[in-house]
């Protein structure tokens, strides 16, 4: 005689997965809304203090809040409007386009070569030991100090700006990719080999994803450094671009134009980081960081 079966759970006793997921989405939306409010509040506070203190005579006379030196948010907004739609409409776009194009090329070349070099040295212990002191010595040099030399060798065009951005970005990406590739557990590699995986399969399915995750962790800084490298190259020797525009503004003691260019560069950097974040979410959707996102 068979043992009696336990009664099947009623439908009402089963967890409502859909309701739980909907509540999780609402919770994340509320959190994003609160974060957005705080970000907006900080921005409004900073701009309000900047605008207000530059209009108070005592602060203008006794502190750094002299509009001659730091301008005013209202004047910066007017300048941005003039560049975009006003009397100087179209003036800013060629400068901005030149800087963005050089930044994009330098970032692509720097990230690509840094990732490949880090992945290569992580799999060749002898080559890593041979090149390690030279890599550390080169990375310790103040790379910005090479900008005049780079400009002298490659001229005033886009090539010198791309080389500068590459030189700044390469080591940042290289060390992250190398660390990610060598941080894989030895047991995982041995287990893959036990299952019959070839060295190429281990590299493609284990080493590259791990190095890619570490590389993406360095990309926000890489974007910023690439943009900084291009702008500095335009400082030193260029007749076009946002860096050239800032230098001209400094020579003319035009603080509004200088801060308008800086605001544009900040916005461009923010947009580039957000775009990279979207790419990272798509490529690394398997990681714990993105697995639970809506």
Image: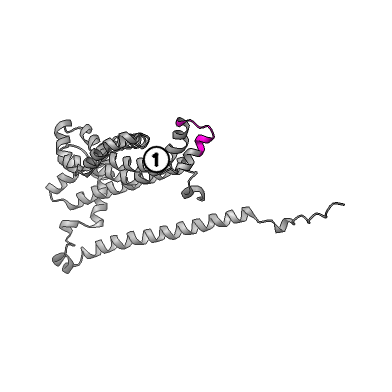
Any part of residue 100 in sight: no
Asked whether 216 or 16 is in front, the reply is: 216
- Considering every residue shown, the one lying at the far bottom of the view is 58
Indicate yes or no whether the magenta region holds residue 171. no
**What residue is rendered at 31% in x and 48% in y?**
267
Asked whether 58 or 162 is in front, the reply is: 162
Tell me if 19 is positioned left or right of 142 in this view: right
- In the rendered image, which quarter is residue 138 located in? top left
- Considering every residue shown, the one lying at the far right of the view is 1
Label 1: which residue? 181
Find residue 284 and report its horizontal and vertical position in percent. 46, 42
Query: Above or below — where is 26 with respect to 163?
Result: below
Indicate yes or no whether the magenta region holds residue 194. yes
What residue range appears in magenta? Answer: 191-199
Find residue 289 and report its horizontal and vertical position in percent. 46, 49
Find residue 188 and report its horizontal and vertical position in percent. 48, 41
Find residue 14 and report its horizontal and vertical position in percent. 69, 56
- In the rendered image, which quarter is residue 150 located in? top left
């Amino acid at each position: 005689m068979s043992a009696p079966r336990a009664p099947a759970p009623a439908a009402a006793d089963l967890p409502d997965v859909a309701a739980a997921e909907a509540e999780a989405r609402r919770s994340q939306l509320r959190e994003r809304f609160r974060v957005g409010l705080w970000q907006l509040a900080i921005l409004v506070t900073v701009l309000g203090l900047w605008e207000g203190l530059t209009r108070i005579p005592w602060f203008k006379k006794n502190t750094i809040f002299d509009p001659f030196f730091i301008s005013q948010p209202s004047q910066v907004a007017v300048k941005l409007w003039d560049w975009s739609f006003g009397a100087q409409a179209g003036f800013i776009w060629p400068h901005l386009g030149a800087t963005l194009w050089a930044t994009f090329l330098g970032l692509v070349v720097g990230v690509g070569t840094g990732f490949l070099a880090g992945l290569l040295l992580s799999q060749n212990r002898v080559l890593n030991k041979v090149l390690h002191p030279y890599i550390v010595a080169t990375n310790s040099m103040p790379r910005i100090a090479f900008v005049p030399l780079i400009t002298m060798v490659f001229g005033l065009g886009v090539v010198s700006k791309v080389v500068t951005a590459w030189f700044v970005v390469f080591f940042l990406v290289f060390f992250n990719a190398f660390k990610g590739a060598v941080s894989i557990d030895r047991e995982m590699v041995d287990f893959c080999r036990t299952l019959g995986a070839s060295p190429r399969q281990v590299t493609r399915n284990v080493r590259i994803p791990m190095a890619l995750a570490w590389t993406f962790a360095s990309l926000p800084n890489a974007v910023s450094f690439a943009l900084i490298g291009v702008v500095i190259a335009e400082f030193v020797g260029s007749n076009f671009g946002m860096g050239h525009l800032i230098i001209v503004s400094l020579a003319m003691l035009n603080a509004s134009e200088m801060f308008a260019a800086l605001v544009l560069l900040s916005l461009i950097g923010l947009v580039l980081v957000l775009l990279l974040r979207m790419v990272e979410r798509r490529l690394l959707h398997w990681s714990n960081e993105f697995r639970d996102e809506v």
